[in-house]
Structure formats: C-alpha cells, structure tokens
Amino acid sequence: MNIFERMQALDRRYIYIVVALAIIIPLMIPYNSDNNTTPPTENLYQMIDSFSGREDRAILMSIRHDASTMAELYPMEVAVLRHCFERNVKVFMLTDLPSAAPIIDYVINTVKEEYPDIKSGVDYCNFGYKPQLFAMVIGMGDNIINTMNTDAEGRKLENLPIMNNINNYTEMNLVVEFSGSVAGATWFTYARPKFGLNVAVGVTAVMAADLYPYLQSGQLIGMLSGLKGAAEYEKLVDIFAAYREAHIDYRLKKDSEGNKIIGGRPFSREILADESTKKLINITKQTKAEFTQTEYEAFVSKYPDRLQVFNSIKSEADGKIILDLSERERLQNELGFFAFDDLERMSRDIKYKFKVARIGMNAQSVAHIMIIVFIILGNIGYFIQKARAEKK
Amino acid sequence: MSFELFSNLVGAFFTLCIFSFLYKDNPFYQMAEQLLVGISLGYGLVMTFNRIFIPYVYQPIVLKHQFLLIFPALLGILYLFRFSKKLSWLSRYPIAFSMIGVGSGVPMGIHASILVQMRQAMVPLETLNLALIFIGTIAVLLYFFFSKAHSGVYGKFVNVGKWYMMIGFGASFGLTVMARISLLIGRIQFLVNDVLGLLK
C-alpha cells in the first residue's frame, strides 16, 4: 500500500483532528494579519458614514436570524452598531422573528457597555419584534411612527427624541438586513422600487453566492458576506470610525465655533492604503500608547488634574513618548472612565468583542489551506489509483 | 457559581456532546440531539406565546377592548382544524387569505429578480466584467434551451455556459466551506474564550 492508497483509506477522524487543530492553534496564538476590504463592504461603510452626525438621517438594522447563524452574523451586527455609535448615526433595530428579539438585546448590550453616553430612544431605538414584516415595510414608507407605534420597551415613538426629523424612508434611508437565508428580499422587492430605499445585507457565506446578482444589478448597495465581511467591516471601523486624535477632547459635544465634534474620520482610500494604518488594526494585545512630544502635550492638557498619573507611566524611546498601560486596573481607578478610555484608544488596543471576526479569520485561513491540501492530495490519490486500476 | 459561568458550562458540555459524534455515535450525542429538539420546541412555544399571543392578541382584545381583532384571531384559529379529519377543510380559509401576499409578491418579485436583472444585462459592454457577464448570461440561458441539439458551433457555445455554471458551483462550494468552518470557529471561540477565558 503506497502513501496515496493509505490516504484514500485514512480514517476521517484524523482529518477532523487536523481541522480542529488548524482552528484552535491560530485562535490560541493570535497573529496580526490583514484583510483586504472589498467594494461591497466599503460601499456599505461609506453609506452609513455619510449619515454621520445628521439629525435627519438614520439606518435600520433588520435582524432575521436565530442563534444557529450567530457565529457569522453577530460580529457583523456588533461592527455596524459600533460604527453608528462611534460616528453619531441614528440607528433603529427591528426583527420579524420572535427568536431574534433576544439577539438584538444581546448585540445592543454588548456594544453599549463601551459607550456610556449612548442612550436608548435618543441615539438608537429598538422596535423589537414586530409581526407581518411585509405590512411594516410598506407602512414605514409612509410614516414610521404610525406603523411601529411603540418601541420594544413599550414607549410611544412620538415621545422619543430620536424620532425628531425622522418620518419615513426619506430620512431612514438605509436598511441593513442580517439573515442566514435570503436576506433583504422583502426590502429590495417592495421598498426599493416604491420608495427608493437603499438596501444592504449581511449574510452567511453560504448565501452570498445567491445575492451577488442583486449586488451587481444595484438593488443592493452593499453586502457583508460571512466572517470575511464581518472582519472587513471591523477593520474599517478601527481605521476610520474608532480613530481618535490626541488633541481633540471628545467629551465636548461642540467645538468653539459651534460645530459638532464627532469621533473618527471619514473614509478615504488613501488612508486605507497607507502603511501607517497597520498599527490601528493589530489584533494582538497593545499596552503602550505612543505620542510625539506635541501630541503628548495636547493629550495631557485635556486632563490637567491627571498629569501626575500620566507622568507615572511615562517613558521615552526613539524620540517618542510612551505611556505604559500594563497596570490596567490601577489606571482605570486613578484616571476614571473617560481619561482611561481616551488613553486606551491611543494605545490602539482593540477589545476582544470588536475583533472576534478577525481572530476567526486567522483560523479560517489556516483551515482553508488545510482543506485545499486535503482536496489536492485526495484527487492525486484518486487519479493514481484509477490509472493503476486501468493498467491492471 | 455565577449564572453566566453556569450557563457557559452547560453550553460547553452540550457542545462537546455534539462534537463527540465525530468520533462515533454515542449516548451523549443522542441525549444532546433529543434535548435540542425538545428545548427548541418548548422555547419556540413560550416565545410565540409571550411575544405574539400576549402583545398582539390578548392585550389588544382583553385589555384594550379592540374587539375587531377577534375576527383575524378566529381566522388564525382555523389553522388548528388541520388536525381534524372532518373539519380540516376549514384550515384552507386562512391559507386562502394569506394568498394576498402571493398576489402582491409575484409582480414585485418578477420586477426585482427578472426585469431589473435583465436591464443590467443590457448595458453597454464597456468593461471586461460586463462582457463576461453578458456572455455568461446568454450561454447559460441557451444551455437550458433543449429544443436544439447541443452540437456543432452552437454546442461549443452552450458548453461555455456549462463552464460558467461549474465556476459558480465552485464558488458556492468555497463559500459553503467558509460558512461551515465559521460555525466551527464560533463554537471553538465560545469554548476557548467564554468558558476558559483564554483569549484577550
């Protein structure tokens, strides 16, 4: 029995072990890898970002899946919601599946705990479970308040500040549907032709092939496909929406000229292609914040009463000022939430829940290589065996 | 022991029970499988009762006295007559009523899935991608035109359609592998991070 014949007869349990190891090892030992962003993801990101800071624009996240597809869809939902919270985009959430209602709560709670300023009914609104999606889709085209009536907590929508300047699809001009089956169909079939609503989807990878024709024909303005789509969106949020400048005090809502202060920066292909952005997307633990002298002075001037704490963790290397965040708990206590959060952002460290998809993509890449190798070896073995059988 | 830790341990135990099938069929796997079916049914029932029956039937009719809603509620109850051999015909009425959706769905579905798609296949062939899409659309459509034998030059052209489909199936297979591996990654992330707390 030669090696190929042995491989043909290999117990499938060995293959399971190899695949399991190919996934577990990259998860346990994370490494910094890059995910090239694709136009469907970038288009969705840019569309949402164009609503940044606007009172008369909002997006709707339609969640249509249960726990079975959370591995792929949940990181997307977290990334999109985080983008909205970072860039001050009004966001509504809705489901027509009873089993998806707890998932909406889970997503909101996961993201919201990092944003103490974000308030339900002001910055976001959860419509919760509503039956008869078809009626809702058509009704919201005329008037959202009359169609939905109340949010998930039973509050009258007309009393919520988030509804100011939001009437129908003219304002809530983008819906992003997350689904494990045919995502977005109700929206691009009924709402897009009648009301001109922009539709985007987040789907499991297995469904993506079915939806590419709608993307190509312009009926979908963007698409996140599977874990890869989620990883791409996470990356864009870290490079643009979650980016912070050392000298800007983001606690202030308006600058000296009365303009809104919004965190992050607009999407730009030049920035995306720039090598310096790589330090913004490291998925390994970052414990050091690096500043130039000017940046450091601007940063600490925002927190003059914490200067002593900053000096206690300060060091210099290669002409840069380094602040060490290793003593996390002490610093959290001494700096308080906002100053510590600001400093942590300067270290460009990414919280686990905001990099889940990228960590998963590392494992995904290794597993794919393993599967490709198995397929090639299996085919070689098959054809060699076939050729020998023909000879005999 | 906190509730979160307890629920994570329960989740981890049943995840491992299901994974044990990869070794061979065993009582742990069977127990987890049966529990999944039972719990899903129970969860679905409670969920439907709490999130549909109570807020959309009980509260409006009993508490808010919106008695007009009794009629659609009765129409919905007719579905239950499917369990009766003699009266199962009554269940056709709510089904007939729900056909309204089909009436509106057909024209709009044709618009989104056929007309707009056709329009996009009729654009000027300015880029290579558009030319490839055009050739692929025609070749695949002709492949399913069985009134003419697939032979000669015509046969060679429709064979191009077969290759397009092969590439499509390959892409679908790749995406399916990606989706299934993602589910496995999700479970292993749960075991490694949520249960063991090893990822930061």
Image (tube, rainbow, N blue to C red):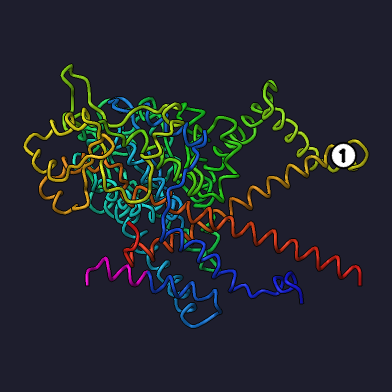
Whole-percent x, y for residue A323 in the image: 21, 42
Residue B73 higher or lower than B29, as above or below: above
Residue A241 location, quadrant: top left
Residue at horizontal 69 percent and vertical 32 percent from the top: B133
- The residue most toward the right is B152
Residue A230 higher or lower than A247, as above or below: below
Whole-percent x, y for residue A219 in the image: 54, 32
Residue A172 location, quadrant: top left
Residue at horizontal 33 percent and vertical 27 percent from the top: A57
Dominant SS in magenta: helix
Q: Which residue is mark 1?
A: B156
Q: Quadrant of the C terminus of chain A?
A: bottom right
Q: How many marks?
A: 1
Whole-percent x, y for residue A111 in the image: 29, 46
- Residue A181 among magenta residues: no
- The residue most toward the front is A318
Give the chain letter at badge 1: B
Residue at horizontal 16 percent and vertical 40 percent from the top: A339
Q: Secondary structure at mark 1?
A: helix
Q: Which residues are magenta?
A: B1-11
Whole-percent x, y for residue A13 in the image: 58, 74
Residue at horizontal 87 percent and vertical 70 percent from the top: A389
